[in-house]
Amino acid sequence: MLRLDKLVPPSFYLILVSLFLHIGIYAHTLDLLLIGGHEMLTLLVKILSDFAVLPNPVLPAMARYLLALMLTDSRHEARMAAKITGCHESQFSRLLNRPDAMKIAKISLNRAARRRLAVLDKLIAHGKQPLLIVDATLIGRRGKKIQNCGRYNHGKGHVRGHKFTNFLLLLDDVAIPLGTLAHYTRDYCEEQGLDYKTEAQMVKDWIHWFPSSGLVTKDQIKHIHFVFDSGYDVKAIQCAVNRIGSHFTMSIKTNRIVDGINVKEYFRRHRHLPWQTIRIKSGSGGKGSRRTYRTRHQARVKLKGCGLVTLICSEMKRKGNGQIVRKYLVSSDHSLSVREVIEIYKKRWAVESWHKEMKQNHGYRDARYARFGAIEAHVNLCLTAYNLVNEGISGLVRKGVTVREYMVASENEKSAQTINLFGGKARLKQQATAAMEKIKVA
């Protein structure tokens, strides 16, 4: 009887086992190569694999969805992603409706932000001031069966939809989104068995979590400066920033107590404080590129519930209607001059421009799902895609590339592959003829 172990050496079986394991681990990469041959998708899968948090079956769909979000377009949704990547849109619906989709999306955002924060030490060494701007934005939604749909004041009326609070790190005019918090309504919390929290409580909890997030080190936190508008004038938020060792600059409300009286009454009683004129560059330069501020300030004033701060009363005349806008600013960093405090607070407008860019070009408001978990996962993936495309990774899509440009490049890539096959010229002619017949009147 012929024995197989004498014909085949034992090392052959070890090679077979390792080969099957290799095929199993990288099946998702082979699948991408067989479907489209896109090097970008393969590179994205490698980057997501390095995150070490995503299950292997999720990687192909996640890479395709992120690639679609990285392209500039007025509308990002599952149907558009399916058209670009050549797969069915149900893949993305299953991806966003997974029970762990929100967790996966948040961890992916955390890992993508870490990659961009690698330059933080170098900028701090050159004297750059990292600013962490906190601000909320609204996504309008309509429909009776949409989860977590609330009614929020927009300043010019009320908006029905969802509210997200974003944490944007500004490094030398480079925006890096670090995280986003969804506001849950009382009905949604009761439905999901969650404890209801106000926006101020969620922001306070995020600040306490920030040192342990892995995004920055303890030494870097000391150099980060938080910037808030008057909507976050809450003692708990200010104390949370002080507790982690950072500083803040924010606009406070007129009824906030300083040295035992409200801030408006404080400046009325201290009319001996002189007015100073400060001119600060605004815009991209040119005629009328400077704004004039009239300021009064008092150093080391006790802000109730917080501690000693620098208090500033700032006035600016609006162009056009000539209306005078007055703001009361406080800063916990006593080493800053009045000009530096105003310049820091002026940069808060960068988050408004960033919100507009995200909504118009990167699909921030384009998730049309009934389940709020899918919407929250989509928003976190939008921020992840923004970080990846702005990192400038060699081999990935360049910032500003539109969907149309990507589709044209993909068709050219397919044509280049087809022409190298046997009878490639004839195949190209048949494809061109078939495409033209589709658009002609029969």
Image (tube, rainbow, N blue to C red):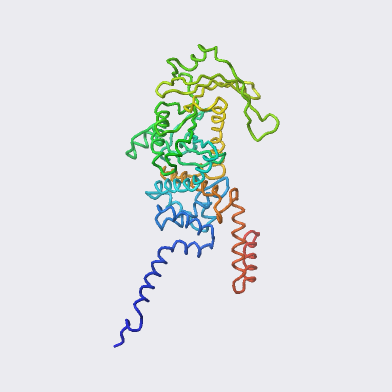
Residue 311 shows in the view? yes
Tell which residue pokes out farthest to the right in this image: 287
Could you tell me residue 11's position as x and y percent? Answer: 36, 76
Q: In the image, what residue occupies the spot 64% across and 22% down?
A: 321
In which image quadrant can residue 318 be found?
A: top right
In depth, the one of 385 and 143 nearer the eye is 385
With respect to residue 303, does 40 lie above or below?
below
State left or right for residue 411 relative to residue 199: right
Instruction: Identify whether 10 is placed above or below 127.
Output: below
Residue 116 vs 88, above or below: the answer is: above
Q: How many numbered discs? A: 0
Residue at screen point 62% across, 28% down: 280
The foreground one among 222 and 177 is: 222
View extreme (bottom): residue: 1
The answer to whether residue 254 is above or below residue 284 is above
Front-lying residue, 379 or 152: 379
In the image, 197 versus 331, the foreground residue is: 331
The reply to whether residue 90 is visible in this rendering is no
Q: Position of residue 159 (x, y in %)?
A: 49, 32
Give how far across and how far down residue 199 sits, in percent.
Answer: 42, 32
- Could you say where residue 14 lies in the image, as x and y percent from the top left? 36, 73
Image quarter of the C terminus:
bottom right
Q: Where, quadrant-wise, is the N terminus in this rendering? A: bottom left
Single out the residue that lies furthest toward the front.
125
When asked about the image quadrant of residue 8, the answer is bottom left
